[in-house]
Image (cartoon, helix red, strand yellow):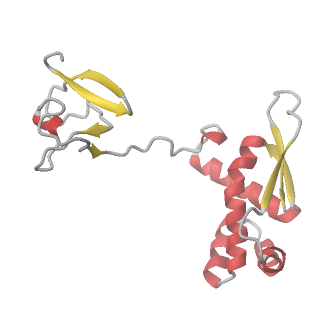
Amino acid sequence: MLAGSVVCVGGVGQVRRTQRPAAVGSSALRCSFAPVSSSGSSLFQAGVPLGAGLALGEAKVTASSHGKRIHRLGGRPADQRKALLRGLTTDLLRNGQVKTTLARAKAMRAPAEKMIGLAKRGDLHARRQALGYIYDPNLVTALFNGVPDRYGDRQGGYTRITHLMPRRGDNAPMALIELV
């Protein structure tokens, strides 16, 4: 190994060498797995080479927030994304079906099923949560009155997504999302 370099293990069988940061504990070095000594301190911060003083398989795992974004909706701002999903969910519950892009249909499936689950629960807290999400209060009343009869024996899967022909103009994949 080169002097002045630190080995970071990125995943299963992936090892890469990076330059040691100028100051100990600097944020210039990012490691997914950092070996831990018996005292519990990270060996990278102490400047100890990889594998020194470690039992086999002993490592400190740090988690990153990778993959937490909703990639399906094109990286739009959070307020616009939430308003879009609320509007689509309200239309789906009002009309029973919505024709939209495949990405939007897949993204709105979870909130639509959550609203039906809240209506199945039927308590006051669930009703207030639904009123905070669905734009039409009369729709919430109709939803809470009709859902227990329609979906009482169903444990989930209240929506169905059917693929349609791509949209003319930009060739975006289209879908029909409907209540089962």
Residue 2 position in % (x across, y down): 17, 15
Is there any visible trace of residue 153 in the rendered image? yes
Is there any visible trace of residue 84 in the rendered image? no
Residue 170 position in % (x across, y down): 81, 27
**Quadrant where the image shows the N terminus:** top left
Q: Nearer the viewer, residue 153 or 130?
A: 153
Q: In the displayed image of the protein, which residue is found farthest to the top?
A: 2
Q: How many labels does the image show?
A: 0
Q: In the displayed image of the protein, which residue is found farthest to the bottom?
A: 123
Residue, x 31% and y 31% (percent of image)? 9
Vertical relation: 25 (above or below) 130: above
Vertical relation: 67 (above or below) 50: below
Q: Nearer the viewer, residue 171 or 16?
A: 16
**Quadrant where the image shows the C terminus:** bottom right
Residue 113 position in % (x across, y down): 71, 63
Q: In the displayed image of the protein, which residue is found farthest to the front?
A: 56
